[in-house]
Structure formats: C-alpha cells, structure tokens
Amino acid sequence: MALVRDRLFKISLALGALWICLFPTFVFSQAPFYQGKTITIVQGRDPGGTGDMRVRALLPFLQKYIPGNPTIVNEYMPGGGSRKAANHIYKSARPDGLTIGNASSGMVAVAVLGEKGVLYDLDKFFYLGSPFSSHHAVFVSRKEAGLSSIEKLRAAAGIRIGGQSVGFSTYIEGRLFAYILGLKEPRFVTGYGGAELDPALMRGEIDARATSADTVLRRNPEWLEKGLVDFHALIEVPKGDKHPHFAPLPELESFAKSEKDRKLMMMQRAFRVTGQPFILPPGTPKDRVDILQEAFRKTYKDPEFHKEYKKFTADDPTPLMPEDHERAIREIPREPEVVDVFKKLVGAGPLPPR
C-alpha cells in the first residue's frame, strides 16, 4: 500500500512538472498584455499645434497607468477635419488595443451632419474621453459701432460679423449667435487668420465676432480695461458651466423661441463638449477597452497631469471621462429637421428662416 502511494506521489509530481513546462502562464501570474508592446496614437492633425501638445502632455501618464508600461508613439494623419484619421481607425486599424485614434471635435460634427467622406459610425467606436470639454463662446461688438444692447443689435441691419473661414468653429458660433438672437440680415465676412480678426474688429472692418471668453482674458485684456467692446451673450459648454468672469452675461439658449432652437443649441454644445476624442476601433476586446479607459481616467484625475497640460497648452484641462464621452455622443440630437437647419447654419448661404 505504501508502495502504491509512493508511486502515485511520483506520478503527481511528474504531471505537475509537465503542466508547468507546457502551460507556464497558467501556473505563474500572467504578464500584462501591454508589457513590451507599442501603442500608436493616430492623430488627425499635423504635428506641433495645440492639439498635438494636448496629446503629448498625456503620454507619460498613460504609459504610467497602463499595466505593463508600453511604449507609446504618435502618428499624424491630417485631412478632412480628422475624417481621414477616423476613417482609418474605423476601417483599417487592427482592433487589438494597440492603435488609438485622436481626432478633433469636427470628426463628430461631420458624421452627424452627414458630410461627404465619412466612412465611420460614431456609435460603434469605443471612447476614451478627452482632455478638455469646457468652452465659453462670447459674442462681442466694437464699442464704436454703438451696438451696446441686444435691442440695438436686433434693430441694426447688415451687421458685419467676422470669421476665419466657412465651417470654422468661431464662424459657426457667430452664425449661431446671429440666428438665435434674431439679427436682421447679418453679413458674414470671412478670410481672416485667427490672429487677424481682433485687429480687424478694432479697425472697424467688422462690427462683431464670436470668440472664446478665455482668449479675451488672455489676449485682449484691454477690451475690458478700456471698454473697447460690448459683450452681449455667451454659450456655456457644458450647459450650466458658468464662466467666472462672464457669468452675468445671458446664455444664448435663453433667447430660444422653440424646441428646434433648443435642439440646435444642444447640438452645438455636444459638438464642443466632445473636445478632442480618443477612440478605439469597433471590435476591440472588452478587457483591453477596460484597461485603456481606466488608464485614461487615472490620467485625467492626476494632479501632475494637470500641471503638465498647462505647461504644454497654457490652459487648464477640463477632462471628459470615457463614460461621459460615450453618453455625450449618444445624446446628440439627430432629427432630420434639426440636422438640416444646422447644416444651413454652418454653411456659406443666408441664415435659414426662423
């Protein structure tokens, strides 16, 4: 009997040794999937701009928080307001968790508005959030134009509103301000570079423009100190996010006359709040999606990331978490009537009738 037990024990040891040799990862703790791997972030832009700086501020923190500390590299794929990069992530990138897309918010707008060249379905990406989501657009007119109130704005015909180019964010915001405020036959003057619009306003080449509240404080403090402009209204992104300096201004939605107007505002906020989306292709394994989403969450919450982000961009981050990003995409109004009016707002033609 003792001999049988001894033989069984020896057989058990032999089988155990064989199991360890054949299946070592089941016996010892598995190495993290990302250990020794390289993650490529495909950016829908050229290198060197603010969008690129936002990504670069993230990289060391992502590497820190992704188990296995993978190498992370950038690849640049400009074109079509990030359409080219989004199409690549959707149709060509392997869904293995090693390729992440990063696009501008234009990627969302062109898809919802049904623009040409969109080969992706917004609702099938996995979202990893955005390093910024807050934005405050203000509508200003030069003091010498004498448009010191909403009533005077509405009474004046042919107000010249400046913008960079058709479809540019401040151009769209200027058109939306004019539409919701009910301005009379406004004229939209385009072709300016971003840095040229403010001097053009001061010279009287244009009467009004939409701009960022933070840009005013950073680049044009004399507008406030010397009273060179009149501030009329602002757009809060997200809704209810009061700007510490411009909180007394009326929010543009308070001038909405219909549910359609309110949905146009909701659509504009959604396009802005999505920020600079990080995306994974459809079919990415859930465990890798979970790993990456958690790494982005930890990065966005890290106080050291906030410091680095400000060094790179001169702005404070306003992160949008992955789950909030997915919800923001789902909640964008997509009714044909609203989409049709918004497309006319962002276009070059006259404002649609209200």
Image: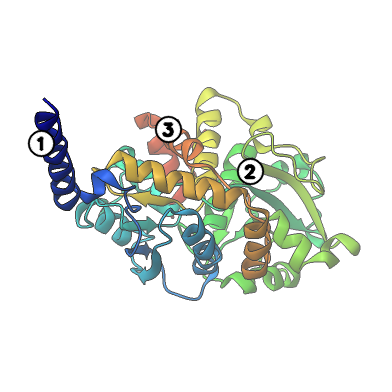
Q: Which amino acid does label 3 sit on?
A: Val
User: Is any part of residue 284 visible from this angle?
Assistant: no
Q: Residue 7 carries which label?
A: 1
Q: From mark 1 to mark 2, how far is it between C-alphas? A: 95 Å
Residue 69 occupies quadrant: bottom left
Assess whether mark 2 and mark 1 are in contact (beta carbons under 8 angstroms).
Answer: no
Identify the image quadrant of the N terminus: top left
- Residue plotted at (33% across, 53% down): 31
**173 or 145, nearer to the observer:** 173
Residue 85 occupies quadrant: bottom left
Is label 1 in a helix, a strand or a loop?
helix
Circle 2 residues within 10 Å: few <14, some 14–19, many ≥20 = many
Give coordinates of residue 354: x percent, y percent: 52, 33
In front of the other: label 3 or label 1? 1
What residue did someone put label 2 on?
Answer: 183
Q: Which amino acid does label 1 sit on?
A: Arg
- Residue plotted at (50% across, 76% down): 48
- Residue plotted at (39% across, 67% down): 71
**69 or 347, nearer to the observer:** 69
What residue did someone put label 3 on?
Answer: 338
Q: From mark 2 to mark 3, how far is it between C-alphas? A: 20 Å
